Image (cartoon, grey):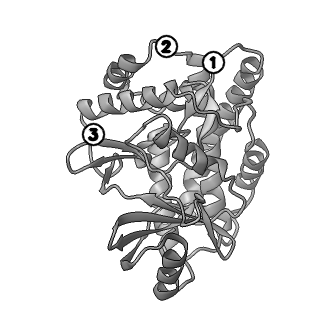
Amino acid sequence: MITPFNITNNNLVKILNDQYGLSTVNLTFLPKGEASWCYIVEAKNGKFFLKIHKAKNLSPNRFQLLHDLHTKASIQNIIYPTPTSDGKLETKIDDYPTVLFNFTEGKTALDTKFNNMQYEALGKLLAQIHQSKIDYPQKEDFSIPSKGALLKTITLLNQSPPESAVKEAWDLLVSAKEEIENKLAEAERLSSELKNANINFVVCHGEPSPGNIMANKEGDVYLIDWDEPILAPKEKDLMFFGKTMEAFMRGYRIYSADTTINTDVVSFYKHLWNINEVVDFGERLLLNNASDDENTHNLKQFKHFLDYSGLRKS
């Protein structure tokens, strides 16, 4: 989120002390992301990253997964939750799931260009995660959950724009409508085929896109923002590395013998990701009466998505 959570810093400091025993020295709000309110917490006993999640119905399983990957599988270069004083991996602030993570300072692949050695290191990291034997209840079923919402967006684009719509975003979506419909049709075909296929599942980050990959000042690579972990084919993660696949796979092969890539699975996930992003940005830029600052931020991210996905017409 780009505006702070509705709580005073003093009250937030008190919660951190009560729940985590932290003697907080400084709180810094980070205007980033759309799914949570984020703060850097500087305390006498260390630096932490606080996320107050917007969705109130989050499953605690995702936080347990990160804890297990760190403690049981010895995966170091990820974010993982700091337990509360009574051993819980999350607390609540006004019913919003709140988690205190380890802090890693750096820049994402959106903010700086990663070199081949860093993508090779990322390949090693994801291979180690894919090889871990951590169980997780959410499993891929090759459905298209956002299909109904996408069809509503397409119907909307055939009408006059609502008053709440950001004009530039509307024009960009109208221009991309035919390609969006093509991607939905192809996703439906692949969904039907893959539901009957025999495919191995592994622990996946779910969205290792440029904004969720970070490098610290030493150049070490981390996977952050685990908002959609899932047991799924490895291609769920690998589909994000088209232009950097060669360097990525050099690292991946060091830890994983399973390097055959199912191109149908990759195509399905690319279409699914594009569908989800169109629905999300469509809601934010066409239907929400957001502030000018939020619209500017969302429009910038939407344009990046259109370029990244290939949906923007040249």
Q: Quadrant of residue 200?
A: top right
Name the residue: 39% across, 71% down.
Answer: 41
Disc 1 marks which amino acid? Answer: Asn
Q: Examine the rendered structure and indicate whether residue 100 appears above or below residue 302.
A: below
Q: Which element carries disc 3, helix, strand or loop?
A: loop
Residue 258: mark in rendering: 2
Q: Quadrant of residue 291?
A: bottom right
Q: Relative to 72, is 56 on the left or the right?
A: right
Q: Which-is-in-front pick, marks 3 and 2?
A: 2
Q: Which residue is mark 3?
A: 114
Disc 2 marks which amino acid? Answer: Asp
Name the residue: 60% across, 61% down.
Answer: 90
Q: Position of residue 9 (x, y in %)?
A: 46, 84
Count residues near mark 1 (Cα–Cα under 10 Å), then give few for <14, some for 14-19, many for 20+: few
- Callout 3–callout 2 Cβ contact below 8 Å: no
Q: Quadrant of residue 6?
A: bottom right
Residue 96 appears anywhere in the view: yes
Q: Relative to 87, is 48 on the left or the right?
A: left
Earlier in the chain: of badge 1 and badge 2, it is 1
Q: Which residue is mark 1?
A: 200
Q: Examine the rendered structure and indicate whether residue 56 appears above or below residue 246.
A: below
Q: Examine the rendered structure and indicate whether residue 116 appears above or below residue 14.
A: above
Earlier in the chain: of badge 3 and badge 1, it is 3
- Callout 3–callout 1 Cβ contact below 8 Å: no
Name the residue: 50% across, 83% down.
Answer: 14
Residue 179 appears anywhere in the view: no
Q: Position of residue 114 (x, y in %)?
A: 27, 39
Disc 3 marks which amino acid? Answer: Phe
Q: Which element carries disc 1, helix, strand or loop?
A: loop
Earlier in the chain: of badge 3 and badge 2, it is 3
Depth check: give the residue in front, 243 or 83. Answer: 83
